[in-house]
Amino acid sequence: MRIAQVAPLAEAVPPKFYGGTERVVSYLTEELVEMGHDVTLFASGDSVTSATLDAVWPQALRLDPTVRDWSAPLAMLLERVRQRAEEFDVLHFHLDYWPASLFGRHNIPYVTTLHGRLDLPELRPVYASLPPMNVVSISESQRRPLPEPNYVGTVLHGLPRDLLTPQDVAPTYLAFLGRICPEKRPDRAIRIARAAGMPLKMAAKVDKVDAEYFETVIQPMIAEGGVEMIGEINEAQKPAFLSGAKALLMPIDWPEPFGLVMIEAMACGTPVIAYNHGSVPEIIDEGVTGFIVEDEMGAIAATRRLNTLPRERVRARFEERFTARRMAEDYLSVYETLARSRRPRLRLVSG
C-alpha cells in the first residue's frame, strides 16, 4: 500500500528523549517499510527513517527557539499533506482532531490515532462540531469519555521486538520511568519503595510546567534518602535500567490512555505494579506480567510477591502481545478496510 504517516512536529521521529507519540509513529513506520509498503513520513527535518521523509519543518519545534507560534508549522503540514493526498491509498494522522475539518471532506481515506486523554470537557463540543472522522483508540478505556468520533478500531501500541531486551544483571531496586508530574504520582512511588524497604531509582523528565511540583513536593522527598534521581534517559539506556529493577512502579492517578513504559518494562522481563486506572487492566495480565493494585498498601504487598512472576514469562507475554509487527498488522487491517470504502472519483464525460 501507499501510506502517508503524518506526525506531530513538536518532536523528531523518533524523538531524541521523551516523546511517546513520535516514538510510536517511528516504530509503526519502520515496521510498515520492513513489510514492503511504500510509506512517506511527514515530520520534522531532523527525523530519521527508512521511509521517504517529507520534511515540513527543518527541526523539531521543541528544539527550535525561533518558533513562537506552533500553529503556523502545523498549518503548513496539513496543507502539504492535502497537496499530495492523491498519491496515497490511505492517510494516517497522529494529530488528534486537527485533520478533521479539511480531510473529513476529502476523497482519500484517512484515519487519526488519538494518542492523548479524552476526558477533557472541551473535547466533546469540538468533536461534535466536526465532520465525521475515522479514529483509532489506543485502548478501550481511552474512548469511554468521548463516544462522538467514528471509532474504526483499537490498536494497542507495540515495540520493535529487539529494541529492548532483558540484560544479564541482578535486579536490586524498584524503578519509576517517565515524567515527574502530579498525575504520574512519583510521590506514591517513593512512599511505596520506602515502605517496602527497597531503593527506588527514578529515570524521569521534569517539564517546565511541572518544575514547581518537583521542587516543592518531590525533591524534598528525595532528600530524605533511598531515592536516586537519574533524570531523563534514552532508549539505549533503558534495557539496563529496567532489567536492573525488580519491578516498575506505575502508581498513576489519571486515566492513562496507554502507558508505553509498561510494555517497555515487559520487553526487559520486568514486571509492573500499577494502579487500576485507564488502560492498565488492558495492558497488564494480572499475576503474569505484574499486579494491578488499588492503593499503596496493595502496592507494598505486591512487592512481596514479585518472585511469583518469572521474568522469562513476562518477556514471552510481551512478544505475544506488544510487538511493533502486531501493531502494524492491526493498522494494515484498518487501512485495507478504509481503502475498500473509498468513494469513486467522478469523471466528466465530454459530448
Image: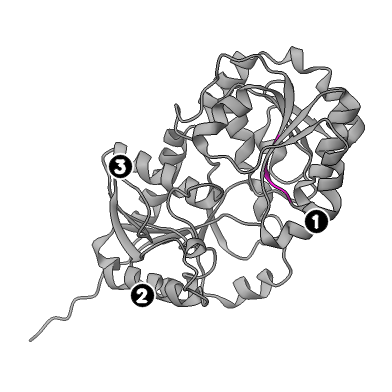
Q: Going 84% across and 18% down the picture, which residue do you hit? A: 304
In magenta, the rendered stretch is: 176-180
* Contact flag, marks 2 and 3 (Cβ < 8 Å): no
Q: Is residue 179 magenta?
A: yes
210 displayed left or right of 65: right
Q: Position of residue 294 (x, y in %)?
A: 86, 37
The quarter of the picture where the C terminus appears is bottom left
Residue 213, label in figure? 1
Q: Which colour assignment does the render follow? A: one colour
Q: Residues within 10 Å of mark 3 (few under 14, many from 20)?
A: some
Secondary structure beneath label 3: helix
Q: From the viewer's perspective, is residue 25 above or below residue 263?
A: below
The amino acid beneath tag 2 is: Glu
Residue assigned mark 3: 33
Where is residue 121, by image quadrant? bottom right
The amino acid beneath tag 3 is: Val
Residue assigned mark 2: 79
61 displayed left or right of 188: left
In space, the residues marked 2 and 3 are separated at their CA atoms by 24 Å
Q: Position of residue 199 (x, y in %)?
A: 79, 26
User: Looking at the image, is mark 2 or mark 3 earlier in the sequence?
Assistant: 3
Q: Is residue 335 magenta?
A: no
Is there any visible trace of residue 158 in the rendered image?
no
Q: Residues within 10 Å of mark 1 (few under 14, many from 20)?
A: some
